[in-house]
Amino acid sequence: MKILFILLATLFADANEQYAAGNYAEAAAGYSQLVAEQPSAEAYYNLGNAYFKMGELSQSILAYERCLRLAPTNKDARYNLQFAESRITDNIADNRAFFLSSFVQSMRDRLAEATWLWCSLLAFVLCLVSALLFLLSNETAIRKTGFSVAVITLVVAVFSICAAYSLHQRDTLREEAIITQGVVNAKASPDKSGTELFTLHEGTKVRITETLGEWCNVSVGNYQGWILLNNLERI
Amino acid sequence: MKKYLFILLCSLIFLPYAFADEVVFRAQAPGKVIAGRPFQLTYTINQRARDLQAPDFNGFEYLAGPYTSQSSSTSFVNGRRTSSFSLTYTFTLMGTDPGDFTIGPASITSDGNKYTSNCVRITVLPPDEEPQPAGQSGQSASNRSAGSSSSSAQSGARGGDIFVRAIATKTNVYEQEALQLSYRLYVAGVDFAQMGNTIRLPECTGFMKQELELGERQFELEHYNGRNYQAVTLVSYLLYPQHAGDIKIDAAQFEAILREQTHRQSRSIFDDFFGTYENVSRMLNAPALTIHVKSLPANKPAGYSGGVGQFTLTPSISTTDIQANEAVTLKLDIQGSGNMKLLKTPAVDWPEGFEPYDPKVTTNYKTSASGYSGTKTIEYLAIPRAAGQYTIPSVQFSYFDIPSGQYKTLSTPEYTLNVRRAPGQTGNEDANAQTYTQVNKENIKELGSDIRYITTVEPNTKNADAPHTCLTPKRVLLIDLILLILSLVIYFLYRKFRQENADITKVRYRRANKVAQKRLKTAQQLLNGDSQPFYAEIEKAAFSYLSDRLSIPTADLTKDNISDLLRQKEVSEELIQQVNNVLSTAEFARYAPTTGAEKQALYDATANIINQLENQKI
């Protein structure tokens, strides 16, 4: 275990040197090997950088997304992901159905599942304590404070648990995917002769709602259509 | 096999023409002869030679020969000397039976080398059916000039024959199927001089017409209706019917000029010797024709190209592995015969992300009796703009196949194209940057911005997946539920406890006055008795009343906290003083003997403060 750890550390250092020297392809190969051995946020972040420098936009977005799955608070990864997303052709912001949903989603993605769970647990305990204070106290001031704290902490607890559940679902179902093909036409049916509905470009994030053979039904904002599974990669 | 051998031989023989000094040994004979008429077969060599080995004249009657003749010439052109020499052997032969015959090669020796001639193909036509006058064929040529008039008369008996035939290769065709229409002049027994200037050709409405190049016109023998004619094609067209139905081709008119011998009264000696001739114009009518044009079957396939004929399709693609922004060419070679000019260019459905250009069409065909034949090459050029795996769908080419009378569809295979990312398109200036400007997102003009640098903090693998194992949303919900139940239990227990508590104090509160009055009544009865129980009863009445009213256990009651509690309840300071007086008097008098009047005063004071407190509703 220790030997493996040292080995991985040297692999990481070597890849960093390659990156610094501008050999992005070699660096990317090193990071890929690293994440295959032991996935880590740092390795994914560096892998994303190497792919971005190579011009592999979709692969870099994939790596940043995976990095943020492991470390949602990594500001550099978030910045670089946004930077890479500004380079893709499809305007995702316009495709989101409702601004509040995107706001909620970005809030959700800011913390890890475990953090949300702890947060929820803490908020619930606070909620119960303040609710008891509200119910049992004779003092008007304590009752007032207890009531408002209880309501706020209940909202926080419910939001946190929902966020955690949503993240849990995201990580177990792996519905989100990135388009890896340069240009893809989504069809109305899982069939090559199906009517072409809309065009997606490399790097766009989609949600897989259904798979059928080598086809999958994806949804992007208000659009929904079938594309081939090998045109995208799950995050 | 024989045919190939013949072609090989011919090519071997004709090859020497390319070189001036090569030995050329050639056989020559008319292509068509009439049975029973003698003809000449010559062998020519351009070198001195000997030992001619003539082949077997199978199918022919050998009449005379070989007669040898030779000629030589020398010329100086611009100081260069050119000399030519030729040696000719002539055989006279005669065909006996109609049919196609081949005379094999002859061989000759020159300068010790042996040379072989080409083969000669001769078609022997049957003789004229009309019984010839006996002995005419047997008569020698010397007889001819004298009998010329009579022979013309003889042919005149049959009608000195000159006419034009309209010949269509087919009269039953499909729409757009090519047919050849030719006008052919037949001459027999008359002296034909030339064609006149008046020619009326049909319009050929309903057809697309194209004149065929005929090359050098030469009369050749043709057996028609039992008679041998000298025939020549005057004009020839390629016709493409444009609609179905019976289409009539009008009659054509040609002017022919014949030479006829004149029979003038005064004959000079030269006239008599040479004869006199004059040109006579004769209009020749070629009959009208009707072509039956069948319409094409109705079940036209989707990608019908408009082609009628026989075609093959050879597709090719320049490459299947290219870089973005480089051109890829899909080439279709359509080969065959038919109405190639009218073929529509099939459409190629390029995948998204390809920039197609107009196809380049090169044609290489010649006209023949069956229409155009040759190749039509269509080159489709497209430039992929984004990297990825693309499939170029199959290209369909449909045409109407005449021999089978059906539509046929030729298709190219599906090509899978691997488009690599163009070199140099790294970082900010990758392929997507171009499309980036196309979608007009340019308002985010980032000058000199770049991604943030890699992290050099070594990956800590422990923090990654450790929290996942202990906490899941379900477990947290379970903990929440347990906590909720726990707090509910706490709440209810506490409430119950409080309720019980509240009930006792309430009851005692309500019953305080009654109890106090009862105690006072007992005290009243004791007023005249012992002072000890009286005082005890008075004290009890006051204390228990205050204890019940203030909800404080009697044990906790002291004079001090009674005043404090009463003050909190906003009882007037005067009353508090009275309460204190009563309590201290009762306490004091309990252990010291007192008079009856004092007892009465304390009783009144106690009843008074209880009344007052009752009125204040503490």
Image: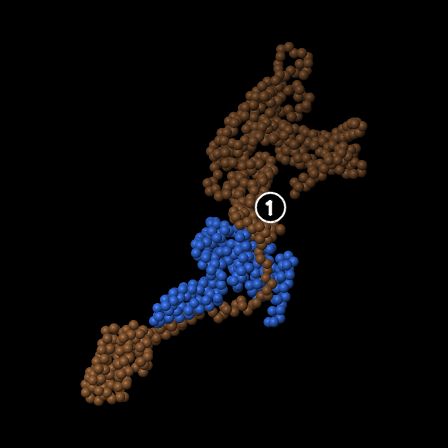
Q: Where is residue B139 in the image (x, y as percent from the top left)?
A: 66, 24
Q: Which amino acid does label 1 sit on?
A: Ala
Q: For residue A124, say whether it is visible.
A: yes
Asked which quadrant contains residue A31, the reply is bottom right
Check the picture and name the quadrant holding the N terminus of chain B.
top right
Q: Is residue B194 above or below residue A222?
A: above
Question: Residue drawn 60% across and 24% down?
Answer: B188
Q: How many neighbours does mark 1 have within 10 angstroms: few (below 14), some (14-19), or many (20 or more)?
A: some
Name chain A's colour. blue
**Foreground pick, B578 / B193:** B578
Which chain is indicated by disc 1? B
**Foreground pick, B484 / B281:** B484
Question: Residue drawn 50% across and 36% down?
Answer: B175
**Foreground pick, B260 / B608:** B608
Q: In this view, does B179 lie above or below B530?
A: above
Q: In this view, does B289 lie above or below B399?
A: above
Q: Where is residue A2 in the image (x, y as percent from the top left)?
A: 61, 71
For disc 1, the marked residue is B327
Identify the element where label 1 is drawn.
Answer: loop
**Foreground pick, B139 / B438:** B438
Name chain B's colour. brown
Q: Position of residue A152 (x, y in %)?
A: 40, 64
Check the picture and name the quadrant holding the C terminus of chain B.
bottom left
Q: For residue B544, say whether it is visible.
A: no
Q: In this view, does B260 lie above or below B57?
A: above
Question: Residue drawn 58% across and 28% down?
Answer: B235
Which residue is outermost to the top? B266
Count of labels in the image: 1
